[in-house]
């Protein structure tokens, strides 16, 4: 099996492409009738899905893995544990699953990249959903201890009330583009023409 | 009298340009009986043919092999041959005999399922669709076969590529029913409930002279997805639904109609009891998973209803109203709804309060404008298509005959009489 597109993507850290590359490769290999399951990089495939936040597809992939592989390859089971916590939205449990396994060399970079991305996503969620939150919960969401978590968010402008251990969230104003370009005039003209006729 | 060897030579010689191929097609059609009688030998001749250059001939040789009873061993030999053929064949050539190509592909699907490896068929079936389609707007018989393989192989994402196309041309009604039903199931699996509803709606409201099983199953899922996505279900079907559907669908889905009534009470405990009591019925329809999603959607529905009455509410009050066990559970529910974009709110842990907000979308951004733009473009092209269809039907003799018969005879403005029969 030619895994070169996959190894290239991993080497160039284009992690967002991993899921699609794995999907296409799997269909191609299956069509040729090759029995691929034993050699398939399920760990990378699952992590690729988590990276683009496609937990549905990760679930289906897990369901399709033969039980012999689930029994014999502990890393695959460990990789799915992350997905399980993502699926049940056990936000803190995701970090436990990431840290609770000694990842192989080829998976390490991707796991680390996903962990970083997940922390950022959690931070964005906290920022949009909370006006005040305890340091304890923040630590759970960000997968850090309380002091590190407090430091991290204060770098982003949040304020800490040391007495109550409460953090006040600083919302970042959303910058969205509002500039229009002249081609829109052409579109508008077409619409009016269409409506008139 | 032709022999197989002669046919092979002809195929090799007459496959290079369009006029040769037309002649070849006639020879092959004449030799169909011979091919069928010699079907057991044909496989051995395939080595002499190139599936990409001699696609038409290859297809004529391959198709009779599909008719013998297929065992697992035979499937093992045939499946890779067909897969290779589909991938390398010339679309132009196979379009001369689309029924044969479709037949081969359908048998291919059967064999892949016999070998219990549906994933093997997903890639080639998609290639087959793209080769046989006259355009991406054309729904072929292979579409539902492909979607079925995607469902069985759990390659839901692969099915999406075909479901994104807008369909304007259909060959057989059965293709359409199955395509929409399987497509609905794929969207349900990907949790894209709005698109699932669209497709299931199409099955339920499609023209049908008598009720069919696909429409019944689709209706059951339609009810469930409606509850999950909209939090409500209306049993009135649109005017354009067939009378067969209007009369019969509800009778076949009694447990589901009861589920809707229980859902509308807003009481989780009652809903859960009802589901438990009728568990077997839902399970035998393979709908238990969806029913469970209906139950969990009720919490969401109840919380959303609160946003219409309150500006701020304590987490404990939310927990009490919605029947959750603790304010922490309520907090997690609200957080998940914020994450999914189902609600706009901020949680204030210090005071244990939730403040409900307005949708911050101002519809002023470039992204939103692009979105509206592309929707308008799609509607404009749909409108043009409808105008073209309308013009075509206005010239159709059947239509004109009927219109002529039913027209008022005594309008001042129309003195031309429309003849009742056209002899064209």
Image: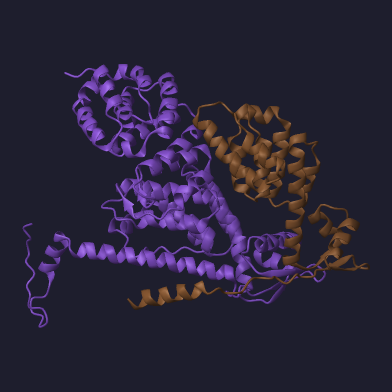
Task: Using the image, determine if residue B270 lies above or below residue A111.
Answer: below
Q: Which chain is brown?
A: A
Give the quarter of the image for residue B356: bottom right
Task: State the residue at coordinates (20%, 28%).
Answer: B27
Frontmost residue, B350 versus B367: B367
Task: State the residue at coordinates (27%, 21%).
Answer: B9
Give chain B's shade: purple
Residue B268 located left or right of residue B418: right
List x then y, in percent, for residue B13. Answer: 28, 26
Residue B211 located left or right of residue B343: left
Frontmost residue, B298 versus B115: B115
Task: State the residue at coordinates (53%, 55%).
Answer: B192
List x then y, in percent, for residue B218. Answer: 41, 51
Residue B250: tell me if it is visible. no
Quadrant of the snapshot with the C terminus of chain B: bottom left
List x then y, in percent, for residue A76. Answer: 69, 35
Residue B172: tell me if it is visible. yes
Query: Which residue is the extreme one toward the bottom?
Result: B412
**Tag count in the figure?**
0
Give the quarter of the image for residue A24: top right
Question: What scheme was used to colour the molecule?
Answer: by chain
Give the quarter of the image for residue B325: bottom right
Frontmost residue, A92 versus B40: B40
Frontmost residue, A6 versus B220: A6
Task: Using the image, determine if residue B159 lies above or below residue B93.
Answer: below
Task: Using the image, determine if residue B148 lies above or below residue A90.
Answer: above
Residue B113 located left or right of residue B61: right
Quadrant of the snapshot with the N terminus of chain B: top left
């Amino acid at each position: 099996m030619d895994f070169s597109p996959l190894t290239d993507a991993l080497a160039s850290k284009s992690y967002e492409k991993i899921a699609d590359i794995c999907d296409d490769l799997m269909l191609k290999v299956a069509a040729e009738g090759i029995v691929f399951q034993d050699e398939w990089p399920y760990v990378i495939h699952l992590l690729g899905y988590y990276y683009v936040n496609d937990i549905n597809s990760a679930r289906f992939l897990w369901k399709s893995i033969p039980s012999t592989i689930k029994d014999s390859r502990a890393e695959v089971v460990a990789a799915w544990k992350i997905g399980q916590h993502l699926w049940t939205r056990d936000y803190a449990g995701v970090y436990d699953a990431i840290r609770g396994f000694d990842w192989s060399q080829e998976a390490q970079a991707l796991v680390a990249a996903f962990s970083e991305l997940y922390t950022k996503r959690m931070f964005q969620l906290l920022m949009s959903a909370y006006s005040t939150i305890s340091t304890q919960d923040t630590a759970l969401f960000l997968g850090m201890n309380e002091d590190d978590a407090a430091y991290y968010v204060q770098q982003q402008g949040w304020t800490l009330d040391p007495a109550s251990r409460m953090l006040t969230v600083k919302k970042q104003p959303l910058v969205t583009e509002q500039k229009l370009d002249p081609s829109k005039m052409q579109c508008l003209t077409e619409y009016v023409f269409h409506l008139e006729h | 009298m032709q022999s197989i060897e002669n046919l092979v030579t002809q195929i090799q010689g007459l496959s290079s340009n369009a006029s040769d191929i037309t002649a070849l097609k006639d020879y092959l059609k004449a030799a169909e009986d011979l091919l069928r009688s010699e079907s057991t030998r044909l496989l051995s001749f395939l080595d002499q043919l190139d599936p990409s250059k001699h696609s038409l001939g290859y297809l004529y040789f391959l198709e009779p092999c599909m008719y013998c009873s297929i065992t697992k061993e035979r499937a093992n030999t045939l499946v890779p041959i067909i897969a290779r053929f589909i991938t390398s064949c010339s679309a132009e050539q196979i379009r001369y005999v689309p029924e044969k190509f479709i037949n081969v592909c359908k048998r291919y699907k059967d064999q892949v399922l016999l070998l219990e490896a549906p994933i093997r068929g997903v890639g080639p079936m998609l290639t087959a669709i793209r080769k046989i389609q006259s355009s991406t707007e054309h729904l072929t018989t292979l579409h539902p076969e492909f979607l079925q393989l995607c469902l069985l192989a759990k390659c839901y994402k692969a099915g999406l590529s075909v479901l994104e196309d807008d369909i304007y041309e259909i060959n057989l009604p059965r293709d359409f029913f199955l395509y929409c039903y399987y497509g609905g199931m794929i969207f349900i699996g990907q949790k894209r409930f709005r698109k699932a509803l669209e497709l299931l709606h199409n099955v339920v409201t499609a023209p049908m002279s008598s009720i069919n099983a696909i429409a019944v199953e689709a209706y059951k899922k339609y009810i469930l997805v409606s509850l999950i996505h909209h939090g409500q279900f209306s049993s009135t079907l649109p005017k354009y639904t067939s009378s067969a559907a209007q009369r019969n669908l509800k009778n076949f889905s009694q447990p589901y109609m009861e589920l809707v009534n229980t859902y509308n009470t807003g009481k989780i405990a009652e809903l859960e009891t009802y589901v438990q009591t009728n568990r077997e019925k839902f399970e035998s329809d393979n709908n238990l998973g969806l029913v469970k999603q209906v139950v969990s959607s009720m919490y969401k529905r109840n919380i959303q209803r609160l946003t219409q009455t309150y500006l701020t509410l304590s987490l404990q009050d939310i927990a009490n109203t919605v029947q959750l066990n603790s304010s922490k559970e309520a907090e997690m529910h609200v957080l998940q709804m914020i994450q999914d974009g189902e609600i706009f709110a901020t949680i204030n842990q210090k005071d244990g309060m939730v403040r409900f907000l307005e949708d911050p979308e101002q519809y002023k951004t470039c992204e939103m404008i692009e979105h509206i733009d592309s929707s308008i473009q799609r509607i404009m092209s749909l409108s043009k298509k409808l105008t073209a269809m309308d013009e075509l039907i206005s010239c159709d003799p059947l239509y004109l005959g009927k219109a002529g018969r039913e027209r008022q005879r005594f309008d001042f403005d129309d003195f031309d009489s429309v003849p009742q029969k056209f002899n064209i």
